[in-house]
Image (cartoon, grey):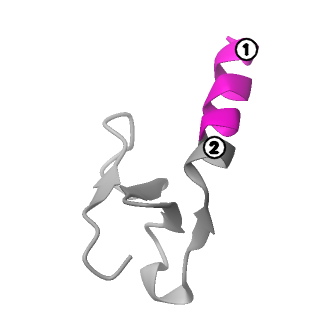
Amino acid sequence: MQTARWRTSSYSQQNSDCVEVAVSEEIGVRDTKNREAGQLTVSREAWQGVLTALQAKH
């Protein structure tokens, strides 16, 4: 994920209380308040499952 482009949600506030996501062969997720703490890396299939579950809640 070293060269991945990290993106912050357009719904986030200016105070950075959100997560960032990077898309490459895998998906990286990290906390905008503590980027140096590391990241969670999941497969594209797992990330799709997260997005599907979130959509089902709305």
Binning the other alpha carbons within 10 Å of mark 1 as few (below 14), some (14 to 19) or many (20 upward) gives few
Q: Is residue 12 above or below residue 20?
A: above
Quarter that holds the N terminus? bottom left
In which image quadrant can residue 5 be found? bottom left
The foreground one among 55 and 15 is 55
Q: What span is in magenta?
A: 48-58
Q: Position of residue 8 (x, y in %)?
A: 34, 51
Q: Does residue 32 show up magenta in the picture?
A: no
What amino acid is found at the position of numbered circle 1 in the picture? Ala
Residue at 49% x, 64% y is 28
Q: Secondary structure at mark 1?
A: helix
Q: Position of residue 13 (x, y in %)?
A: 36, 44
Residue highlighted by disc 2: 45
The disc at residue 44 is none
Residue at 44% x, 79% y is 35
The foreground one among 36 and 13 is 36
Q: Position of residue 42 (x, y in %)?
A: 62, 60
In this picture, residue 58 sits left or right of residue 22: right
Residue at 38% x, 34% y is 11
